[in-house]
Amino acid sequence: MSSRDAWAAPSRRGILSVAAAGGAALLGAPAILRGRAFAADPVTLLNVSYDPTRELYKDVNAAFASFWKRRTGQELQIKQSNGGSGAQSRAVLDGLEADVVTLGLAWDIDALADHGLLAENWQSRLPSNSSPYYSTIVFLVRRGNPKAIRDWPDLIKPGVQVITPNPKTSGGARWAYLAAWGYAQRAPGGSEAKARDFVKAVYAHVPVLATGARGSTVTFAQQGVGDVLLSWENEAHLSLAEFGADKFDIVYPSVSILAEPPVAVVDKFARKHGTGTVALGYLNFLYSPEGQDLIGKNFYRPRRAAAAAKYAGQFPKVPFFNIDNAFGGWRKAQPKHFGDGGVFDSIYTPHD
């Protein structure tokens, strides 16, 4: 069995779900389809993605397969693999033959480019730095917010348990770590030393580290562990949708990080499989009106103005800082904070 055939164990739906989108408007054909003829044989595409995108790509995959069939007459099966963003990147490096990757942060795709799996300029090949949507890190707390967790300093109050994944394997966890660091460094009297101390204190309140964001959501929402979950914004909204607004509240801190999860065709494997055109069409679809509407429905922040306006009510305005201005980009932040022997390794002590 090839690594592509063994792409992943059958994935469970997970603990969260949203209704599949219906009635999508027929799109004009992307430029990539014009004047092309397609084989009648079915084609299979593998999207290797990060943890909280199961519901989003369930909807996108169905919509794009239908679109592709209408426009080309070709049957398309889209397989999906989900896990912690860093772990997924390593799986592709180890031979998981993804046609496209839709990961939690740019570094995890840079790592693939560094090993020759796609072009080094991959992030300039699609709009908005190849990020068709954006998000941020919020706090999910138990209904009524019994521990009065309203901003970053509240995470280190006595008796507060914080749930967050392992930043060595989870993209969402790296965004959360950097959001906490950026807050502390920008606070009055803040400095790098104070940021380090603050983040160390936060992780002293973390009883267990899951490998990915969805695992941490299970720990917090299903198993009832912890007082606050450092969560992707969409994952927090999905928790309300799944379990009811009477179970949890979403708290927006005073400042958070602009998280831009990117997408890319994995050139080496797309060429090998002959899927380059459909893979690029699939990613372009995310920027289309239909794709952007599905993004908003699944609680990610759309790029297109019309979709952003449609879903503006579910996305409070939050002051953001970004990875480039605050940390010099992922090329600097990753090895400094999350590489072997980096800051995280020096400040985190596992609980017994």
Image (cartoon, rainbow, N blue to C red):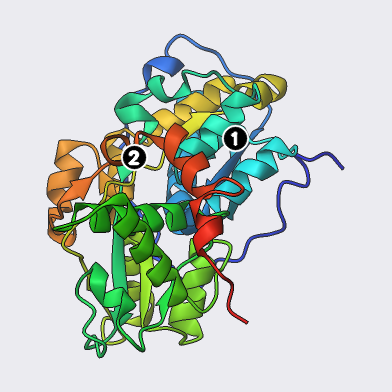
Asked whether, in this view, residue 261 is left or right of residue 307, the answer is right
Front in this rendered view, residue 43 or 176 = 176
In the rendered image, the vertical position of residue 185 relative to residue 220, given as above or below: above
Residue mark closest to the camera, 2 vs 1: 2
Image quarter hosting the N terminus = top right
The answer to the question of whether label 2 and label 1 lie on touching residues, with beta carbons closer than 8 A, is: no
**Residue at the spot of label 1:** 75
How packed is label 2: few (under 14 Cα within 10 Å), some, or many (20 or more)?
some
- What residue sits 59% from the left and 72% below the top? 350
Badge 1 marks a residue whose secondary structure is loop
226 or 232, which lies in front? 226
> Measured along the vertical axis of the image, is residue 308 above or below residue 203?
above
In what quadrant of the picture does the C terminus appear?
bottom right
Amino acid type at circle 1 is: Glu
Looking at the image, residue 131 lies above or below residue 121: below
Q: Is residue 28 visible?
A: no
Residue at the farthest right position: 1
Tell me which corner region of the image, top left, top right, bottom left or bottom right, holds residue 24.
Answer: top left
Binning the other alpha carbons within 10 Å of mark 1 as few (below 14), some (14 to 19) or many (20 upward) gives: some
Who comes first in sequence, dot 2 or dot 1?
1
For badge 2, the amino acid type reads Phe
Query: Disc 2 designates what residue?
Result: 327
Percent across and percent down for residue 152 are: 25, 68
Q: What x and y, as percent, mark residue 264?
A: 49, 30
